[in-house]
Image: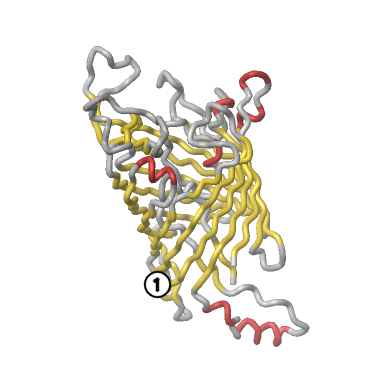
C-alpha cells in the first residue's frame, strides 16, 4: 500500500512579515487549509516472479495492508532563511528544524478523516525577529480535517474517483484547528474552522490543481493580547484605558484576522518513476474585525475601511523517492511568503524568490525527509 500526502502550505501571517521558519510542513499554526488529502493510491505493484502465472496469482490476491484504513506520515525539514545569504551588516541569519506527524482514517471510498501536528525547533535567529527566541520550541495548533471526493463505479464494479467534464477531479474539505499554540494564546483564539474545494487535471506527466478555501477565526478579542506574567512589570495599560482587558492583560495594536480567503494554483511534473518537480502559488486575503475611516492622519498609501492584509506564497520543490516501496522521499525546495506589492503598493513582488529585500527573510530554502506508512 502506498500513501500519498498532498503538498500544502497554510498560513496567515502575524504582524511580522512572515519569517522563513513558516516555510515547510504546512504552517499549521498559522492558517488551516482543510482536506489534507491523505489518500490510498491502491495496491502496490506485485513483485516479479519466475513465471507469469505466479505474478498473476499474486496480483489477484490483495495484501492484508491493502484494506487497512489507517495511514500516516512523518515529515522532517531543515530550513535556512534567505537573510543568512546576505553579506555584511544586513545579514539576518535564521534556521529552523521542523517535524510533523500525520494520521488519516479512510472512512469509506472517497471519504477520509485526518489529523496533523507540527513542532518547530529554532536553531538560529536574529535580534529583530519577533515571537521567536534562540532555541525556542514552538508547538503549532492541531489540525483536523474531513476530505471527500465523489465516487463512481468502473467497468469492474469497483469504486473510483468521479471525473467532471473535461477530465477534472473534484474534492471538498472541512477542517478545524484546535488552539494549542502560543500564537492562539496571544490571539485569544478559541477555534478556527475552514472549508475548501479543489479541481485537479492530469495531462500526461503534468498535473495541474486549483484550490479555493475560506476560513473563520473565533477570537475572544479583536486584537492580540499581551498576558503579563505575575510579578513582572510587563506592559501597563493607561488608567481606565480600553486596552486594559483583565487583571494583567493588555490589548496590543495588532489586529487579529477575523476570516480569510485563499486561492491556489499548483503544477506537478512527474519526470520519472521517482523524480518529481512541483511549483505552487497561493494568495491569501485576510480581513480583520475593525474598520477605519479616512481622516487627516491617513497615509496616502493606505486605504480606508476594514483592515485587510494580503499575502502571497510561492513554492518550488524537487523530490526523489527512495526504496523499493517508494514510501520514503527526500526533497529540496524554496519557499517565499511576502506581500504581493512593495511597500509603496506600486510594484508587484516576484512570488518565488525575494530579489528585493532578501534580508527581510521573506524567502527560505529547505531540505526535507518524509516517510509515509
Name the spot of residue 262 as percent of width and height, x first: 38, 43
Q: Is residue 342 above or below residue 125?
A: above
Q: Quadrant of residue 320?
A: bottom right
Q: Quadrant of residue 72?
A: bottom right
Q: Residue furthest top?
A: 296
| In-front residue for pair 192/150 | 192
Name the spot of residue 145 as percent of width and height, x first: 40, 60
Residue positioned 34% across, 50% down in the render: 192
| In-front residue for pair 277/16 | 16
Residue at mark 1: 152
Q: Horizontal placement of 89 versus 314: left or right?
A: right
Q: Quadrant of residue 182?
A: top left
Residue positioned 40% across, 38% down in the render: 229
Instruction: Tell me the quadrant of the picture where the N terminus can be found.
Output: bottom right
Q: Residue furthest front?
A: 231
Numbered disc total: 1
Q: Is residue 347 above or below residue 38?
A: above
User: Is residue 150 among what the camera can see?
Assistant: yes
Instruction: Tell me the quadrant of the picture where the C terminus can be found.
Output: bottom right
Q: Horizontal placement of 245 versus 353: left or right?
A: left
Name the spot of residue 353 as percent of width and height, x first: 57, 32
Residue positioned 48% across, 36% down in the render: 131
What's the colour scheme?
Answer: secondary structure
| In-front residue for pair 156/117 | 117
Amino acid at each position: 500500500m502506498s500513501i500519498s500526502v498532498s503538498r500544502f502550505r497554510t498560513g496567515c501571517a502575524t504582524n511580522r512579515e512572515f519569517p522563513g521558519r513558516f516555510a515547510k510542513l504546512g504552517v499549521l499554526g498559522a492558517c488551516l487549509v482543510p482536506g489534507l488529502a491523505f489518500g490510498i493510491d491502491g495496491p502496490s505493484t506485485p513483485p516479479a516472479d519466475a513465471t507469469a502465472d505466479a505474478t498473476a496469482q499474486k496480483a489477484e490476491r490483495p495484501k492484508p495492508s491493502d484494506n487497512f484504513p489507517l495511514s500516516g506520515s512523518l515529515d522532517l525539514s531543515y530550513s535556512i532563511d534567505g537573510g543568512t545569504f546576505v553579506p555584511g551588516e544586513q545579514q539576518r541569519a535564521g534556521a529552523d528544524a521542523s517535524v510533523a506527524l500525520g494520521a488519516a482514517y479512510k472512512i469509506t471510498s472517497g471519504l477520509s478523516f485526518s489529523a496533523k501536528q507540527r513542532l518547530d525547533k529554532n536553531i538560529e535567529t536574529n535580534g529583530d525577529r519577533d515571537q521567536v527566541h534562540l532555541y525556542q520550541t514552538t508547538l503549532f495548533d492541531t489540525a483536523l480535517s474531513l476530505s471527500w471526493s465523489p465516487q463512481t463505479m468502473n467497468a469492474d464494479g469497483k469504486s473510483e474517483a468521479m471525473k467532471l467534464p473535461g477530465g477534472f477531479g473534484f474534492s471538498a474539505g472541512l477542517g478545524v484547528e484546535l488552539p494549542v499554540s502560543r500564537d492562539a494564546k496571544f490571539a485569544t483564539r478559541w477555534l478556527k474552522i475552514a472549508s475548501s474545494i479543489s479541481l485537479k487535471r492530469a495531462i500526461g506527466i503534468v498535473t495541474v490543481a486549483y484550490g479555493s478555501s475560506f476560513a473563520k477565526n473565533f477570537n475572544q478579542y479583536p486584537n492580540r493580547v499581551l498576558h503579563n506574567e505575575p510579578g513582572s512589570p510587563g506592559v501597563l495599560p493607561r488608567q481606565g484605558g480600553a486596552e486594559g482587558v483583565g487583571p494583567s492583560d493588555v490589548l496590543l495594536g495588532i489586529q487579529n484576522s477575523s476570516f480569510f480567503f485563499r486561492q491556489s494554483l499548483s503544477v506537478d511534473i512527474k519526470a520519472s518513476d521517482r523524480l518529481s518537480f512541483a511549483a505552487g502559488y497561493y494568495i491569501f486575503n485576510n480581513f480583520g474585525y475593525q474598520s477605519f475611516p479616512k481622516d487627516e492622519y491617513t497615509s496616502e498609501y493606505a486605504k480606508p475601511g476594514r483592515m485587510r492584509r494580503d499575502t502571497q506564497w510561492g513554492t518550488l520543490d524537487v523530490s526523489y523517492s527512495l526504496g523499493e516501496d517508494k514510501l520514503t522521499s527526500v526533497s529540496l525546495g524554496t519557499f517565499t511568503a511576502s506581500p504581493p506589492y512593495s511597500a509603496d503598493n506600486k510594484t508587484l513582488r516576484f512570488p518565488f524568490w525575494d530579489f528585493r529585500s532578501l534580508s527581510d527573510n521573506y524567502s527560505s530554502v529547505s531540505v526535507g525527509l518524509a516517510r509515509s506508512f
